Amino acid sequence: MVSTGNAIAVCPECLGGLSTPSLPAERKANIVVNKDNSDVTAEFYKGANEVLKIAQENKCKLAILKSKSPSYGHCLIYDGNFSGKIINGYGVTTELILKSDIQVISENELDTIEL
């Protein structure tokens, strides 16, 4: 975790115990698998819970998340088949954060932030 000013950078995959770099992963329903078909669901959910805990401890009001990610996807994610197809959906971390009082946007929506 790196804290700079009022921003906190976190990586749910690292917080969940996955290595960096790691194999590409995609979410399909409530399962997350990486490119070699290993189930990494538990690691993604563990990391998501750690990110939410950090956000709540720091009273975060806004989360800027990476689009299409199996962790951070906001409204759009890959279809879970490693086909490159994009579908409507949320990453594991995004889904959890949306259940809290934290606003969520993707990096593509930075111009919508009112400071």
Image (cartoon, grey):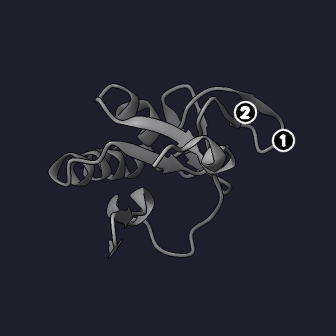
**Secondary element at tag 2:** loop
Q: Residue at coordinates 50% horizontally, 43% vertically from top-left?
A: 114
Q: Position of residue 44 (x, y in %)?
A: 42, 48
Q: Amino acid at mark 2?
A: Asp
- Within-10-Å neighbours for mark 1: few <14, some 14–19, many 20+: few
Q: Nearer the viewer, residue 106 or 92?
A: 106
Rendering quarter of residue 79: top right
Quadrant showing the N terminus = bottom left
Give the numbered dot on residue 46: none
**Secondary element at tag 1:** loop
Which residue has dot 2 on it?
A: 79
Residue 69 visible at all: no
Check the image and report above or below for 75 versus 50.
Answer: above
- Within-10-Å neighbours for mark 2: few <14, some 14–19, many 20+: some
Mark-to-mark CA distance, 1 and 2: 7 Å
Q: Nearer the viewer, residue 61 or 47?
A: 61
Q: Amino acid at mark 1?
A: Ser
Q: Position of residue 38 (x, y in %)?
A: 55, 52
Q: Nearer the viewer, residue 55 or 70?
A: 55
For the image shown, how many numbered marks are present on the structure? 2
- Single out the residue that lies furthest toward the front: 115
Q: Position of residue 81 (x, y in %)?
A: 75, 38
Residue 100 visible at all: yes
Q: Residue at coordinates 20% horizontally, 45% vertically from top-left?
A: 56
Q: Residue at coordinates 43% horizontally, 65% vertically from top-left?
A: 18
Report if the CB atoms under discs 1 and 2 are less than 8 Å apart.
yes
Check the image and report above or below for 14 versus 89.
Answer: below
Give the numbered dot on residue 83: 1
Q: On the picture, is 45 further left or further right than 71?
A: left
- Single out the residue that lies furthest toward the left: 57
